[in-house]
């Protein structure tokens, strides 16, 4: 779905320091009944965020002032489970643009990229460091620079991880930075695709 | 000639182009659709003013949202009704075959595709659903995609893909009595972990895999996604050809012979290298059950609950060090794209035959398709179930993800033949224990977690008597 170009993000970090956060957790199945691609932000992490009676749980981070930011910091295997792209929509529509983790589920990673969300992968060791950095300076502003592919956390001293480079596929980087998507690119290749089809054995 | 894996062969055969950065423009032979992940993709296509490129290669069904009783009356909430009618409108508009809710061939997308002969060896197959990996059982590269990628396939019949690494999982020997392919895959995920397959595509091989029926192979490949893999495939063989011969859309005549000779090329070469290899012995595999909140948190049905993951233990209301065996169960669900096929209903009914449903358990038996439902009726399985106090429902995804009314209440325990036990998956606060159809049957008659091996011998004695 369409998204704003992503070039430079400067924001506080919102931590959700659990491993294996699955897409049912990110957006429960009962919210997938919509035929629209909007309106998912309010249901992000719904069953952690709201009590059974529907009132916000004041203990959950998204319901606190520190819960509004563009950068999510989370544990490995983020986005595992169902392929629902609604999970990426919910994260984007809540306001996140960058998710930092030591591992992303494959389908979620692609869904994120297709929706203007950067899955920023770091090593487990770097993730540990970043969690400690967050705890020592919870209101600090972190920067994510797409052009130089650098994550600059709000460290209180100069450390080996003052700037963490991250990897991103060049084509995907270009799409994120310009807000363009892949559908039009592939549709433009139809002549080549039709030529391929003439010798397919399995279609 | 370099030795290639089966995955490499199929991948190479479907590359339309390779971009500068190494990504492939990757051709998709078969596109399955359902009502939940397609509406926004159709809307996107319309907004761009693009045609649906290859409607003949797309097949749609309704499965996730629909009720499993009273389908003829089509009583659903307004949002579900809208999704269903939206898919109907879109399929009419673009000329896509749709097996709607009351169609005799309707069912769960990953059950009806193979039934109809639409899934074949050597194909590339996608659907907006992660359990698309199921179709890998036929020796296809099959995987789940999000709605944006659904739109890409609608517009171009292609995706942009990075080639994953390859993982071969070899299972030697044979499964023992009372142990099913569901236990096999739960065992493997418990041993390797839920993130072990991330970045990989799996090939399942070995004597135990060869010995499985197509339906059992589908159960294995279905859950490849639960260990993080894009998908899993099994090389086609005589079992595959026998399953596909004569199906409604299977090739026939000269086309069948042509297809067979292509399928005979679909195997990993001797000496082909995989990025990672794992080996297991089938005789080590017991009936399994999950205790926690991800599919990798499984133990033998008579095993001890670990003390790891206190959060999962708290959610499930169990203690590390205890056993699950003997635990009272509130619900049993037989169904889903994992275990909703005729073989699964046969296994369940063979165990419950001559026994009675435990009065304190609510049991949902949901066939994977209308054809499975009909076959269950024709074979007398429905009668065996009714005599034992069970009812057959109508097909749909049902309690696997509880989008319809088949929800497990908070705090209640459900033994489920589906594929995920995440917190809240079957309803907020629901407590899911994943297991095989045999273990589900054992719970349905005893009202507790029970070892099916202690209950299957007697039914064979009855038959001999």
Image (cartoon, rainbow, N blue to C red):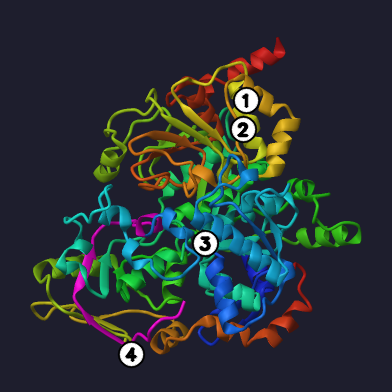
Determine which residue is flagged by label 4: A147
| Alpha-carbon span between mark 2 and mark 3 | 33 Å
- Give the SS element for disc 3: loop
* Residue A92 at x, y percent in the picture: 35, 73
Quadrant of residue B441 within the rendered picture: top right
- Give me the C-alpha separation between circle 2 and circle 1: 8 Å
Q: Which quadrant of the rendered structure holds the N terminus of chain B? A: bottom right
Q: Are marks 4 and 3 on the same chain?
A: no
Q: Are marks 4 and 2 on the same chain?
A: no
Q: Are marks 2 and 1 in contact (CB under 8 Å)?
A: yes
Q: Secondary structure at mark 1?
A: helix
**Which residue bears the numbered disc 3?**
B230
Q: Which residues are magenta?
A: A1-26
> Residue B39, labelled with which disc?
none
* Residue topped by disc 2: B392
Name the residue beneath numbered marker 1: B385
The answer to whether the residue labelled 1 contacts the one labelled 3, judged by CB atoms less than 8 Å apart, is no
| Subunit ID for the residue under disc 4 | A
Q: Secondary structure beneath disc 2? A: loop
């Amino acid at each position: 779905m369409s998204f704003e170009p992503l070039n430079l993000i400067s924001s506080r970090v919102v931590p959700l320091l659990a491993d294996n956060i699955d897409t049912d957790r990110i957006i429960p199945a009962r919210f997938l009944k919509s035929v629209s691609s909007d309106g998912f932000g309010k249901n992000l992490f719904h069953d952690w965020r709201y009590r059974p009676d529907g009132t916000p749980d004041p203990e959950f981070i998204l319901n606190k002032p520190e819960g509004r930011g563009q950068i999510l910091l989370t544990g490995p295997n983020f986005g595992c489970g169902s392929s629902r792209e609604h999970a990426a929509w919910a994260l984007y529509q809540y306001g996140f643009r960058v998710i930092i983790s030591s591992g992303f589920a494959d389908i979620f990673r692609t869904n994120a990229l297709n929706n203007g969300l950067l899955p920023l992968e770091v090593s487990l060791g770097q993730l540990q460091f970043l969690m400690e950095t967050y705890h020592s300076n919870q209101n600090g502003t972190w920067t994510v620079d797409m052009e130089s592919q650098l994550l600059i956390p709000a460290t209180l001293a100069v450390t080996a991880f003052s700037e963490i480079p991250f990897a991103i596929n060049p084509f995907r980087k270009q799409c994120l930075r310009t807000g363009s998507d892949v559908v039009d690119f592939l549709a433009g290749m139809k002549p080549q695709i039709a030529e391929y089809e003439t010798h397919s054995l399995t279609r | 000639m370099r030795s290639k894996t089966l995955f490499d062969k199929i991948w190479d055969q479907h590359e339309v182009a390779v971009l500068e950065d190494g990504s492939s423009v990757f051709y998709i032979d078969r596109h399955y659709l359902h009502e939940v992940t397609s509406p926004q993709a159709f809307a996107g296509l319309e907004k761009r003013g693009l045609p649906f490129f290859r409607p003949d290669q797309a097949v749609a069904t309704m499965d996730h949202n629909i009720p499993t009783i009273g389908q003829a009356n089509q009583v659903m909430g307004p949002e579900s009704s809208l999704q269903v009618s939206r898919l109907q409108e879109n399929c009419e508009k673009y000329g896509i075959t749709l097996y709607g809710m009351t169609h005799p061939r309707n069912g769960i997308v990953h059950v009806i595709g193979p039934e109809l002969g639409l899934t074949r060896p050597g194909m590339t197959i996608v659907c907006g659903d992660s359990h698309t990996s199921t179709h890998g059982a036929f020796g296809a590269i099959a995987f789940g995609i999000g709605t944006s990628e659904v739109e890409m396939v609608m517009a171009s019949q292609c995706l942009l893909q990075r080639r994953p690494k390859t993982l071969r999982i070899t299972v030697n020997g044979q499964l023992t009595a009372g142990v099913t392919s569901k236990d096999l895959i739960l065992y493997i995920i418990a041993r390797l972990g839920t993130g072990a397959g991330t970045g990989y595509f799996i090939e399942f091989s070995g004597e135990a895999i060869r010995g499985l029926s197509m339906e059992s192979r589908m159960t294995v490949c279905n859950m490849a996604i639960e260990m993080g893999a894009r998908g899993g495939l099994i090389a086609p063989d005589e079992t595959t050809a026998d399953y596909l011969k004569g199906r409604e859309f299977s090739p026939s005549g000269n086309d069948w012979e042509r297809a067979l000779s292509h399928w005979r090329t679909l195997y990993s070469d001797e000496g082909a290298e995989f990025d990672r290899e794992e080996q297991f012995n089938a005789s080590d595999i017991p009936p399994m059950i999950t205790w926690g909140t991800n599919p990798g948190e499984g133990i033998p049905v008579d095993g001890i609950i670990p003390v790891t993951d206190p959060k999962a233990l708290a959610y499930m209301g169990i203690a590390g060090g205890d056993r699950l065996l003997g635990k009272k169960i509130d619900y049993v669900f037989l169904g889903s794209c994992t275990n909703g096929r005729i073989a699964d209903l046969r296994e369940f009914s063979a165990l419950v035959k001559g026994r009675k449903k435990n009065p304190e358990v609510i049991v949902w038996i949901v066939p994977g398709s209308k054809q499975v439902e009909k076959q269950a009726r024709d074979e007398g399985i429905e009668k065996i179930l009714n005599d034992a106090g069970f009812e057959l429902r109508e097909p749909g995804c049902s309690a696997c993800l509880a989008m319809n009314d088949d929800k497990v209440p908070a705090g209640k325990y459900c033994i489920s033949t589906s594929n995920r036990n995440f917190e809240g998956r079957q309803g907020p606060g629901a407590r899911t224990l994943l297991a095989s159809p045999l273990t589900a049957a054992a719970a349905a008659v005893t009202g507790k977690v029970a070892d099916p091996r202690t209950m299957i011998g007697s039914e064979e004695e009855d038959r001999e008597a």
